[in-house]
Amino acid sequence: MGRTEEILKELDEYLMTNLYPTHRIVVREARDIYVYDVDGNAYLDFMTVVTTALLGHNPPGLADAITETAKRLIAGNGYNWYTEELLNAAKAVLSLFPDRNMYNKVHFKLSGSEGIELALKIAKRYTKNTYVMYLMGGYHGRTYLTGSYHGMRRKEYGPLPPGTLIAPFPYPYRCPFGDMPPEECGKAAVETIEYYINYVAIKDVCCLVTEPIQGVGGIVVPPKDFFERLKRVLDTYGILLIFDEVQSGMGRTGTTWAFEQFNVKPDIVVAAKGMTGGLPASAVVTRKEIASAMQLNDEHSTFGASALIMAAVKATVDYYNMHKEELLSNAKRMGEYAMKRLMELYDKHPLIGEVRGLGLMIGIELVKNRKTKEPATKETSDICLNRALKRGVLFVTSGWNGNVIRFAPPLTVKQEHIDKAIDVLDKSLGEVEREENIK
């Protein structure tokens, strides 16, 4: 029995290991795109810890910044006192937003879920309205509140919190309004949202929360003009647009923020994951006019904005800014190359229903039949957690039906890495098709 098997056996004894479909490996260290287990096996990380290791594992300067700060100050937060690390992190994050009239205030929390909840409080304070609107398939965390709100909620934790609306999201491959061109699907979604605003919430909506590209929902990219249409409607009724850029932000799509891809500026942006290189933090960014609506004692956090975490934020953002042109260029080039290679797999493998994405945020939707689009949920899980894993590549599932493979390497990925990952997918897909007789 190897060390991995020994540790897994004890983990199963002591931990609630049934809460998430985990890769059955025990990681010892990670560098750039590679993860190494306790037995010395190397894996290509094409899930980047659910998009957290955006710049690769342990980018230069990160460990040094954390270590230096830890020698001076560990306990503390950004509520009971301030630190220079907090100021530096705030400046760093705001440097990612060129429009300083629109984005000039930031507040730090410990996770994307907490960031979303703070954004809701701000929106309610500012607009003095009640209802919160979400979109089907959206994902905004797993706290009890955000887990109930998002469009992929579990019925066991229902019902929805009071004052919640969930409206359709334009999912072109599975348009909720029927078979129609993507632009028409987007237009129908906006019309439905406006109907909900007028006749369900009676114009009492404070905000609409959405991801620019749905991540856990299956890397669903809406029609190009969807958010422009949506923002015009929301502005008409004084409703704030909140973008959850937790997975899509800081270069993943080929631009610093995914909202840049859609020619729209949300009123509040929530960022996290790749912003810290792996430590727990999120940033809620908005303008002074909106931020000023919050009142004293509206927020507190025992560990939020600690010096240790803020040092990590600054180091990560500084590295991104220093190499921004190179990282964004690579995200675009490698994203285009990956799409080209994946479309070759689409032509070869009937198990693939659609390949979609922007930059290095790509989804591969698997179906048992291209005509019926029946989700290949079991097959997708098998490929990610077994077949690809055994061949040394880490993928993770996503999608409304758990039938989408997320293809999300770090921004530092090279062509040779993509070639290996796609070769592994090619072999894994072929095996499943032969065994399941999918033609």
Image (cartoon, rainbow, N blue to C red):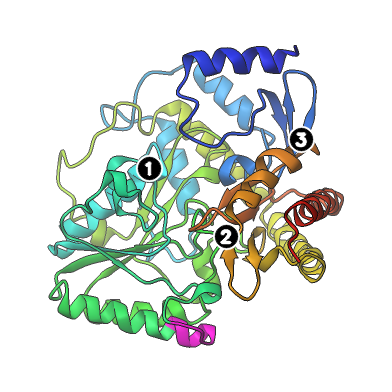
Q: Dividing the image into 4 quarters, which one contains the N terminus?
A: top right
Give the image location of residue 238, x and y in percent: 22, 74
Question: How many angstroms separate mark 2 from mark 1 (CA)?
Answer: 25 Å
| Residue at the (38%, 67%) spot, across then down | 266
Does residue 323 show up?
yes
Tell me where the magenta segment starts and ends, as one range: 178-186
- The CA distance from mark 2 to mark 3 is 27 Å
Q: Amino acid at mark 2?
A: Thr
Q: Secondary structure at mark 3?
A: strand
CA neighbours of label 1 inside 10 A, class few (<14), some (14 to 19), many (20+)? some
Mark 2 residue crowding within 10 angstroms, few (<14) / some (14–19) / many (20+): many
Nearer to us of marks 2 and 1 is 1
Q: Which residue is mark 1?
A: 142
Q: Which residue is mark 2?
A: 256
Q: Is residue 346 above or below residue 233?
A: above
Which one is nearer the viewer's eye here, 276 or 434? 434
Image position of 66 with respect to 137: above or below: above
For label 3, the residue is: 43
Label 3, label 1: how far apart the Cα atoms are: 27 Å
**Residue type pointed to by label 3:** Tyr
Seen at 80% across and 50% down, the residue is 431
Report if the CB atoms under discs 2 and 1 are less than 8 Å apart: no
N-terminal-most mark, 2 or 3:
3
Q: Position of residue 370 (x, y in %)?
A: 65, 72
Earlier sequence position, callout 3 versus callout 1: 3
